[in-house]
Amino acid sequence: MLDLGKLKNLSAWPQMRGDIESALLAVLGDLPKERVEPQAKTVDETEHAGYVRKRVNYFVDGWERVSAWLFVPDGKEEAPAIVCCHRETPAGKDEAAGIEGDMRLAFAQHYAELGYVTLAPDCLTAGERRVSSAKPFDTKQYYKSNTKLSFAGRMLVDHMYALDLLEEQKRVDAARIGVIGHGLGAFNALLLAAFDDRVRACVASCGFTRFATDKDPQRWARAEGMCLLPELRKRLDSGDFAFDWEHILALAAPSPTLIITSTSDTPFANPKSCEKAVTLAGRVYKLLGARTAIDHQEHQQGFNNFTRETLEIADEWFERWL
């Protein structure tokens, strides 16, 4: 495994960065080399106090359109924007929009009320992208027709198109786009920050624990249900990983990245593991002159209790960096 601790100077970072990207892409799969125009369409819109909520759809490849909620705050030019990645919920984008599900995770609505343009898209197999014959987040059908791109890779590509759509909005300052997510949403937020430098600030809550200390490493490549990274399966038993989460965080550098970890009742209740990943990645941030742009915060509540205090920490992060 590539050792970030051996990175002594900035001149060695480009080579190591390339090696990390190659190791990750070997697991994520073949990301499309050509991109299509999103060609966004507004399906309907409703006015609310302080913002307009629009249902939009846009292309993410040559034939598929994704549905998303776009929130545009009132009366603000050149506003910062945030992609809001939903967790593993059948409601998909509707939870992030505050329409159904846990209102504590209604990030798109919350940040629109604070003056940000926000976008909450559906992940494949959730919301309006569910296939009636399959359970939400069951990837078996996906892999029947996609053998070269992992499900995680597909979600990454889709969220890159979310950035494309936000960049096209007249009300958006394209130099101030962030991303936030909880659970699966945090996983997606971190991958997006790692692979797309248009992300200028990231908040990820309860999204990972390091492979090296994971008590259930099979979660990343399960044979049933949601299989995120099938190519990782061959490494699980031996523990011989080419990369770990500190390498993903390092790829996001120098974009400000906040990691939030629950201390209880969560699949990833391992703050020490997350803190180690942040510390190791922090060496890259320091070399890039952005030592304070990565941080780790703990909260005492369980996995599904994204508290007001936790949200305030995220608010302060975006206010500081966007």
Image: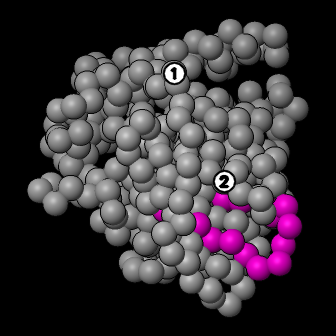
Residue 82 figure quarter? bottom right
Residue 101: in magenta span: no
Q: Which class describes the residues within 10 Å of circle 1: few (<14), some (14-19), or many (20+)?
A: few
Q: How is the image coloured?
A: one colour
283 horizontally vs 190: left or right: right
Q: Nearer the viewer, residue 229 or 241?
A: 229
The amino acid marked with disc number 1 is: Lys
Q: Measuring 83% from the left and 28% from the top, which residue is drawn there?
A: 288
Coordinates of residue 195 in the picture (x, y in percent): 60, 32
Q: How many marks?
A: 2
Of all residues shown, which one is farthest toward the left? 133
Q: Residue tagged by mark 2? A: 166
Q: Which class describes the residues within 10 Å of circle 2: few (<14), some (14-19), or many (20+)?
A: many
318 horizontally vs 55: left or right: right
205 horizontally vs 62: left or right: right
Coordinates of residue 184 in the picture (x, y in percent): 42, 53
Coordinates of residue 79 in the picture (x, y in percent): 81, 64
Residue 70: in magenta span: yes
Above or below, 56 relative to 73:
above
**Magenta residues (range):** 68-82
Above or below, 92 relative to 176:
below
Q: Residue tagged by mark 1? A: 33
Secondary structure mostly seen in magenta is strand
